[in-house]
Image: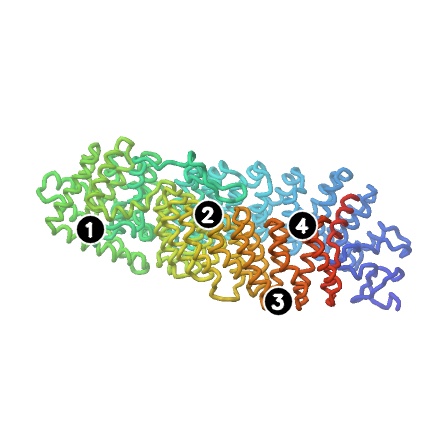
Amino acid sequence: MRVDDINKGAIIDSRGPNITWREGIILVGFEDYGPDCDSMRITAFLDIPGQDNLTPLARLEKYAFSDNIFNRQIIARGLLDVFRDFSNNEEDFLTVMEIVVRLSEDAEPTVRTELMEQIPPIAIFLQENRPNFPLAFSEYLMPIVVRYLTDPNNQVRKSSQEVLLILLEQDLIFQNDIENKVCPILLDLSAPDSDDEYKAEAVNIICKMASMLSKSTVERLLLPRFCELCGDGKLFQVRKVCATNFGDVCNAVGQEATEKFLIPKFFELCSDSVWGMRKACAECFMAVSYTTSPEVRRTKLSPLFINLISDPCRWVRQAAFQSLGPFISTFANPSSAGLYIREDGTLSIRPPSQDITPTSDSTSSCVNITSSCSGNPEHIKPDPLTEGTSIESSNFLHVESSHVGEMEKRMACPASAEEELIKSCQNDNSCTIKNANDSQVNSCQGLCNRACSGSSEDIFNNFLYWRTPLPDISQDLELLQTKTEQQEEGCCIPDTVCKNCVASSEIKKVLESLQEHMMNDPDVQAQVQVLSAALRAAQLDSMGDSETKNVEESHEEVSSSEPSSTTENQNTVSSISSQNELLMTRVIQSTDSEKHLNGTSEHLQKEQISDPTPFEDDKSKLQDIIPQPLLDQYLSMTDPARAQTVDTDIAKHCAYSLPGVALTLGRQNWHCLKDTYETLASDVQWKVRRTLAFSIHELAVILGDQLTAADLVPIFNGFLKDLDEVRIGVLKHLYDFLKLLHADKRREYLYQLQEFVVTDNSRNWRFRYELAEQLILILELYNPSDVYDYLMHIALKLCADKVSEVRWISFKLVVAILQKFYSNNASALGLNFINELIIRFRHCPKWVGRQAFAFICQAVVREECIPVDQFVEHLLPSLLSLASDPVPNVRVLLAKALRQTLLEKAYFRNAGNPHLEVVEETVLALQSDRDQDVSFFATLEPKRNIMDTAALEKQN
């Protein structure tokens, strides 16, 4: 066949050897090239002599610019081999570089893609040969990578982006090239007037580059553009990429730049109109929080996270609840938790001298007050006086009318306005509560004892309020307050009746303002129903004389507990009932200076004595480690209503993050999580219980032995009787849990360990395998008598398992038990165990049992777990008797045990050993066995591989 008859176009050659025709193209020297052919070069055809009287370099140039696309692809694919071939001559090397630069301008996208994929290995090669070509990569190849970032072909651009990230990750690009070549092109592509597709790709590269560059480079070159892109109003995909990678960028620039530049942008993204942006922010919240200071984390990020949990979109709420536990874990402080994590990732207990002491009474009192206002509805029980009046309506009137979005948040987390008041007062000793237009609430100013200050005309903030605000009725409330004060001075009407009238009037005005919003918004309709019930309750309260007396007495109690604020508190108007007046008074008192805390504590003690039940429930959830609203939301994840409105797996997420939350709070605050943990442990979903079972040993380390015995042991016992899917979680860390218990408590589980042998599905052999592994570790926790009475029988049963993997690990367990006996001078128990092994396995009617005996004897000799004289006297005769076993598989194991293990021990190599002759006779008999496998293993020299290895070591 002539070459001209094949196909027109550029053909490699037909005169060289090994010519193949494939789809109209001749391949010379590389038609068998494949991914597994490491010894053959793609460009081997360049070395074929006498093809066209051209030098290899000229032949390379010929094929690199051939009219045939396939030829150019082959050259691009084999560039690494080309560089290796021509690296010995600098002039030829530079010529190859120029050919590569010209080839990078090829019009065919597949050629450019092939070329780009070869850049990383070429860069590594040049890095290894940097003394010879120090600037070759920077001058020739780096411009190609940068230029391809703007290539019109999508595949070429994607390839160049991947290559750029690989080069940055392996630190193959000079810092000067990063600042002068890479960053400028990315800034141009991400400019406001850039193409949308290029901009989205550029911001993705910028975000991924941030973790690979130095902090100063990112902060100086990329951070300003990233902040601009976070507010890109043209393309939401750009903001989505920024939100997704926000945590990585924060980690790259550090705490100072994060708080100064990125946190404001994060607030904007969290209030974005596109729910996908808010969801991405919720997912990366922990990474952002990790980079900030504790103050910013508590005062700024915590309220922001509460807003995400109360988001109108279910997907945002779902992501927020999933991130709630990890976000809470960022508040962890090893000094207060009494624990720390080692470098290997294990949780360890700090020495007792370093444990944190319980918080002082004054701090606890302050926290108690705060939590009483910020707890969940399920934790706050109303007084009998206000039983019918909703907490939502009282909060609504105390903080004036807000907008419907704020009402949603109050329904999900009551007293949200009081929470904001507490936070601001605790941090700045000044209170500022904002209405829908962020103006100051004058009625609340009186409650703050003239200590509240703030701007009266703040700008409306879309971040805080999702919807159009309701009408401002602050002036009406001021007027009502003034009238009430006049009535108190000159009117003989009872104080409580007057206040209830004012409350009814206020509720009516709010209802009127909500009517116009009621038609199209179900949330407003729900609020109208709540306020209507509150109105009826307020009217009923005004009719009871006995109730009025109780309200006056409770009001006098509050006034007497705080002398400095008695005058102002007497002028305060209660919005709905005396219960809410007491609630608001607690808030104000918690914000006063330290000199007022004693009086507040006395008042709380009086209140607990008069009505201990409601407040004790709240007190059990109080702590001062994390913001109370975060803990309240976390505890609410076990509410069945959450599964319907947020996520069906929300309880599983709660269980997954519970050890981290417990570590953050510390064992002194375990009372906050105890009920939640018990609820999760009894959840109907086995996945939730399984999650707890896998982490109960870590929780035991956090809580310590006393709390573990009191609270975790009952749950642990329940898991032992649960489904296999739950029991496996307990079983995998059985040793870790039992070692934390006291010896007497630990002995109670000896009998229950036998229950693990029985499984719901007999085919679940991995369960029994895990049991054998754990028993090997558990042996050290019990004395030899307990091991003999309880654990030995489990080991014997596992040695006879149907699955070979279970039997193999069980043989190791038997060896460990024998070692336990003889190392603790319990040779009598060891002898009884050996006799049991002989009876059960040596004389077993099934050949598998007799084979197991040979395995056990070989393991005993290898590990030297019993004295040699004991082995020779009690096990060796039974082992040698297997030479006459009718099953070849048993004799094969015997041959291996004798030849490869027994005869290698120094005791049996001694010529004067009286037992050596018997062993050698048995080996000779096995060497002449009629079965080839038996004779082979009996003849095999065990030292052969060892000698070969030693010889190789000497040669090296």
Q: Label 1: few (<14), some or many (≥20) within 10 Å?
A: many
Q: Image check: 451 left or right of 183? A: left
Name the image quarter holding residue 131: top right
Contact flag, marks 2 and 4 (Cβ < 8 Å): no
Image position, residue 834 (x, y; %): 56, 56
> Secondary structure beneath disc 4?
helix
Of the pair 449 and 332, the residue shown nearer to us: 332
Q: Which residue is mark 4?
A: 148
Q: Which residue is mark 3?
A: 847
Disc number at residue 739? Answer: 2
CA distance for labels 1 and 3: 81 Å
Residue displayed at 39% across by 43% down: 667
Q: Nearer the viewer, mark 3 or mark 4?
A: 3
Q: Nearer the viewer, mark 3 or mark 2?
A: 3
Q: Image check: 61 left or right of 933? A: right
Image position, residue 661 (x, y; %): 42, 46
For marks 1 and 2 on the same chain, the one whose residue lies earlier in the sequence: 1
Name the image quarter holding residue 857: bottom right
Asked if one can make out residue 653 in the rendered structure from this viewpoint, the answer is no
Q: Tell me: residue 98, above or below residue 832.
A: above
Q: Which residue is mark 1?
A: 386
Of the pair 742 and 218, the residue shown nearer to us: 742
Image position, residue 416 (x, y; %): 32, 47
Give the colouring mode of the picture: rainbow
